């Protein structure tokens, strides 16, 4: 059995695959939280790498390397939580304002 695609159906599917302006606005609004998450993950990877190097040094494989420690990880985690809090507060404020506009009409 052959699959035959109609040109109009293909065109509709292509348009559907593109992000809408609302999608792009939502991504832009969430960008601080996304960047904070990425920074936290980068820092955790750095700490894990340093810990592995430290363990290698402990068994005598290489020269000792100072571990990054937990404080920077906690700071990155706090920045992530703050970005998520700000995003949630902004979303809640926007939703409340839209709801108020809808009930006033």
Image (spheres, rainbow, N blue to C red):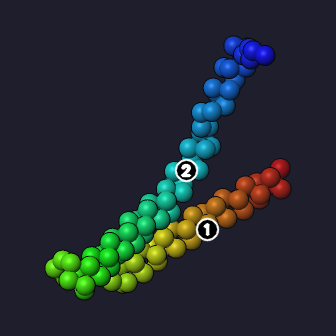
Task: Give the quadrant of residue 12.
Answer: top right
In this rendering, the answer to whether 18 lies above or below 87 is: above
Q: Residue at x 50, y 63 (%)?
A: 33
Between residues 48 and 93, which one lies in front from this camera angle? 48
Q: Which residue is mark 2?
A: 27
Residue 91 seen in this snapshot: yes
In what element is the residue under mark 2? Answer: helix
Where residue 70 appears, x then y in whole percent?
37, 84
Between residues 7 and 50, which one lies in front from this camera angle? 50
Q: CA distance from mark 2 to mark 1?
A: 16 Å
Residue 66 seen in this snapshot: no
In what element is the residue under mark 1? Answer: helix
Q: Which residue is mark 1?
A: 89
Where residue 41 appears, x then y in whole percent?
43, 67
Is tag 2's residue or tag 1's residue first in the polypeptide sequence? 2
Instruction: Answer left or right for 95 relative to 30.
Output: right
């Amino acid at each position: 059995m052959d699959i035959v695609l109609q040109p109009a159906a293909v065109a509709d599917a292509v348009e559907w695959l593109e992000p809408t302006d609302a999608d792009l606005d939502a991504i832009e609004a969430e960008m601080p939280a996304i960047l904070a998450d990425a920074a936290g993950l980068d820092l955790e990877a750095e700490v894990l790498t340093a810990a592995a190097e430290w363990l290698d040094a402990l068994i005598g494989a290489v020269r000792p390397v100072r571990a990054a420690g937990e404080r920077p990880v906690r700071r990155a985690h706090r920045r992530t939580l703050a970005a998520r809090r700000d995003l949630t507060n902004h979303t809640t404020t926007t939703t409340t304002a839209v709801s108020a506009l809808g009930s006033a009409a």
